Structures are given as structure tokens and as C-alpha cells.
Amino acid sequence: MNIEELVGLVQKAVNEDENENEERAVDILTQLESTPIEAFDFTSAKFAACGKSISALRKKAKSELVKRKAKECKDAWTKIIVSKSSNGTDSKTPPQKKTTKTTTETTTTTTTAPKSDENIEEKKKEKGEEKVEEGRNTTTENDEKSALEQVQRTIASKIEQTNNATRDRSRDVIAYGLALAHCEGNCEDISVTSLARIVEEVEDAMSEKWKDLGKEYKAKLRQLAFNMKDPKNPDLRRAIAKREIDATTLIDLSSEELGSDERRAANQSIREHAEAEAVRGQRKEASTTAFKCGKCGQRACTFYQLQTRSADEPMTTFVTCVNCENRWKFC
Ligand SMILES: [Zn+2]
């Protein structure tokens, strides 16, 4: 079928509906639905006119059945057009080149079986190539990762064992942060053995301060691990590796002090924003009934949330009672 024939067929469907020949209009639309429109240049004015006519039928055909059939036809065409456009190797391919490609494909359509086989072959090939590409990327990533893991293992092998699983695990975590500093080339003059001593000192200081190895010990480890691994905070791990911060000072630092400049600035702006919001909020109506004031027992409060600790921990919620201006916070 050429484009002229397509135009003629679409027009015939429109006419049949106009003359209330529902059955004939539906027959033509059925034929149009299965027409291999891949062959046509979708950008041509004639093809566009066909699409427009079918859309019009879909919306305002006299017969409901014709409307439904027109919709099916339109959907089928859209599917082909979309898949055709997205299958193009290059989206910038000029329309003329597209037409040539389309014609070639139509020629192969007559010999149906080989075409689909070819397509499968092509797709397989494409996927295979993608896999190779992916494989390459993964290899590079793996190389970096394994180098890091190797340094971590070397440090870990030089760390004294504590006979306590929690403490040994903490030591591994801290060793990872220092291995990162080593791999970033920020402490080349520091030997792996020295890094192992630092790990021991930091963990010793922690278990000395929080002897029960409980919540606070674990929170400190999480905080340290988060900040030492933070891609935006290479200065912290370098400073620890170079003993610019000693172990006892390190474990007393707040999240703010541990954090990168960027994070500090972000926290500052969140705080300022939240405070401004809170001030505005007080003048307004209560924004929630979710909290009950411990002082006056009312449920009319405003609240804001703030990241006061490291970003991987839950936010702290600050609540203000609209009735008595009582303020409290919880995590
Ligand atoms: Zn109150």
C-alpha cells in the first residue's frame, strides 16, 4: 500500500461513518489497524492528515462502534510510531535517512520470517555489546573497590584483636575510613601500621568512654563512619590519618564539627529557614493536632524538623504549643 492508497482508505472510512454505514466503516478501520504503517514517512503531510482523520473519528464518529474501532486503530499506529522513533539509532537522524531505512525494512517485510530472525540477531548483538560495555565499567569499579578493600584488609590485619565482636567490627569500620584516605593519596607518608595504631586508639577511646558499648558507643561509631566515608569530607579522614586530631578529641566532636564545610553550610541554612518558619508559624494557626502539649494539654501546635546530627539519622522535631508557647523537642 502506498500513501495515496492509505489516504483513500482513511477517507472512505470517514465517508462510510458519515453515511451511517457502521459495519463498512468498522471493516475499513480494522484493515487500517493492521496496515504496516512502518513503511510510511511519519513526518509527511499526507500521513499526518490520515492520523488526524482517525483521531477525529475516534472523538466524533456518528457510531459508537466506529469511535471505539478508531481508537484501537489510533493506538496501534501510535505504538508503531513510538517504537519506530525510539528504535532509531540516532535521534538526530535526518528525516530523509529515516525514509530510506523505512523502505529497506518494508522490502524485508515480504519475507517475514528472516526479518524477525534478523531483528532478534541484531538485538542480541546489541545487548551483547551493552553487556561488554557494562562489564568494562564494573571491572574498573571493582578494581578501585578491591584496591580499597585490600588496603582495609591490610590495616585490619595489623590491628590488635579485642576478643569482643562489637569492638572488632567497629575497628573494621574505622579502618575503612582510613583506607579511603590512603587510597585518595592524602596520607601517603603514613604507613599502614601507623593507620592500624590510629584505629586502635580511636576505638580504645570510645570503649573507654562508653564502657557498656551501648547506644552512645554505637551512635558515635555510626556518626564517625558516616563522616569518615562522606565523599564530600576527605579532609576529616586525612586529618585523622595524619594525627591532626587525636583520638580523644575526635570522639568528642559533634556531628557539626565532624561534618564537611558543605554539610555545615547546608545545616545552617536549614536551621535558619526552619527558625524563620517557626516564627511565622507562631503567628498563624496551629498546623497540627498530632502533638499534645505537656503543659496545657491542648493539641494545637506548630512544628519543624531539623537534621541536628548526621544525615543518616532521623530528624529532630521541634514543637511549639500555640496556646501556651511551650516548646519541646524529640527525635
Ligand atoms: Zn501548651
Image: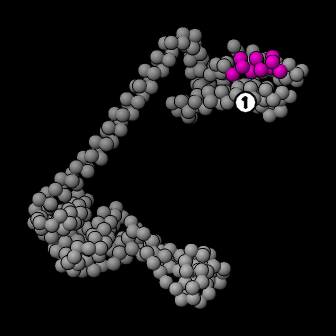
Indicate the quadrant where residue 31 lies.
Answer: top right
Image x and y of residue 256, in percent: 37, 76
Please state the extent of the stretch shown in magenta in the rendering. Answer: 22-33
In the image, what residue occupies the spot 31% across and 72% down? 219
Question: Residue 71 colored magenta?
Answer: no
Quarter of the image where one finds residue 222: bottom left
Which quarter of the image is occupied by the N terminus?
top right
Q: Residue at x 49, y 84 (%)?
A: 328
Please indicate, yes or no, whether residue 192 appears anywhere in the rendered image. yes
Q: Quadrant of the C terminus?
A: bottom left
Furthest toward the top, the residue is 111
In the image, farthest residue toward the right: 19
Residue 27 belongs to the span the image colors magenta: yes
Q: Amino acid at mark 1?
A: Lys
Of 73 and 216, which appears nearest the observer? Answer: 216
In the picture shown, does residue 311 fall above or below 9? below
Query: Which residue is nearer to you in this view: 309 or 207?
Result: 207
Residue 131 in the image: above or below residue 47: below
Give coordinates of residue 86: x percent, y percent.
56, 33
Name the residue rendered at 51%, 30% in the picture: 89
Along the line of sight, the residue nearer the viewer: 206 or 252? 206
Q: Is residue 7 visible?
A: no
Residue 107's place in the image compared with 154, above or below, is above
Q: Is the image coloured rainbow, by chain, by secondary structure, or in one colour?
A: one colour
Picture coordinates of residue 192 (x, y %)?
Answer: 13, 62
Q: Which residue is mark 1?
A: 71
Q: Is residue 13 left or right of residue 283?
A: right
Helix, strand or loop: magenta stretch: helix
